[in-house]
Image: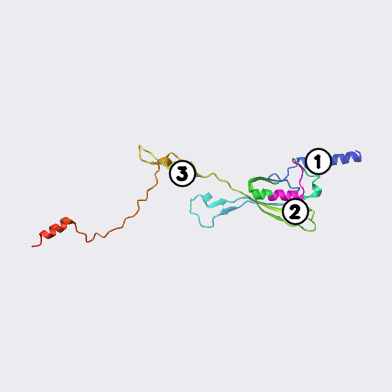
Amino acid sequence: MSVLSALGLAVAGQLVDVLLRNKRQIGTIIPQVVVDEQAIDDLMITSHPVESGANITDHAVKQPSTVYMRCGWSYSGTLTNITSAGLAPGPRQAYEQLLALQASREPFDLVTGKRSYKNMLIRRLTQVTSIETENALVIDVEMQEVLIADVQGMSYSTSVSTGTVQPASVAIGQSTANDAAYQPPVNLGSKQLSDVTNAVTADQAAQAQALVP
């Protein structure tokens, strides 16, 4: 194999690796390089004694996942780092995209080397420029998961035939048929109480007068 053929195969292999490799992704932002990555999953467990036979899951709460990534961009890598959107952004453009994503406060998907996350927000961006990184961007991105739950309330309806109260599951903010029949209490004001300890009726006074000789 000639030197030119070997060189051609090496270049082709690098291009295939760039195009097909599984890259880390913050929303729609693809880092040129990830220097460090740390994922934390916490479970908050009660420190108080638990009654024997109690459901232990009621005393342990899953905390939002947290991911720390140290990402890097440089102008020298924009020509070799090809993404689905074209050439990768430079350091200034990448920094602006991260700031815009944080300011939007819209949950996004995060893809790491070990796992994918949903409903993530950027909690903190830390960027330090030194002599070595004057023409590059090395930034720490701290992201936290947003736990989303479906909340339902309870409404009660009275049965006319039995007079019993039946619970019904109703979403928060949803009106029911009983809401139209409900009448709020009316304030009738207050009255001054009078002392009736020594009060004597007219009949009692007449009877008392008849007894007087």
Q: Is residue 147 magenta?
A: no
Q: Residue at x 68, y 49 (%)?
A: 100
Q: Position of residue 121 (x, y in %)?
A: 64, 49
- Tag 1 near tag 2, CB within 8 Å: no
Which residue bears the numbered disc 3? 154
Label 1 vs 2, first from the N-terminus = 1
CA distance separating discs 2 and 3: 51 Å
Tell me the magenta residue range.
Answer: 85-99
Q: Classify the position of the C terminus by image quarter.
A: bottom left
Label 3 vs 1, first from the N-terminus = 1
Is 72 left or right of 198, judged from the image as shown?
Answer: right
Name which residue type carries label 2.
Val
Nearer mark to the viewer, of 3 and 1: 3
Q: Position of residue 127 (x, y in %)?
A: 72, 55
CA distance separating discs 3 and 1: 59 Å
Quadrant housing residue 176: top left
Which residue bears the numbered disc 1? 15
What is the magenta segment's predominant secondary structure?
helix
Q: Position of residue 9 (x, y in %)?
A: 85, 39
* Colour theme: rainbow
Q: Secondary structure at mark 2?
A: strand
Q: Is residue 95 magenta?
A: yes
Residue 138's label in the rendered image is 2
Name which residue type carries label 1.
Leu
- Which is more toward the observer, 127 or 71? 127
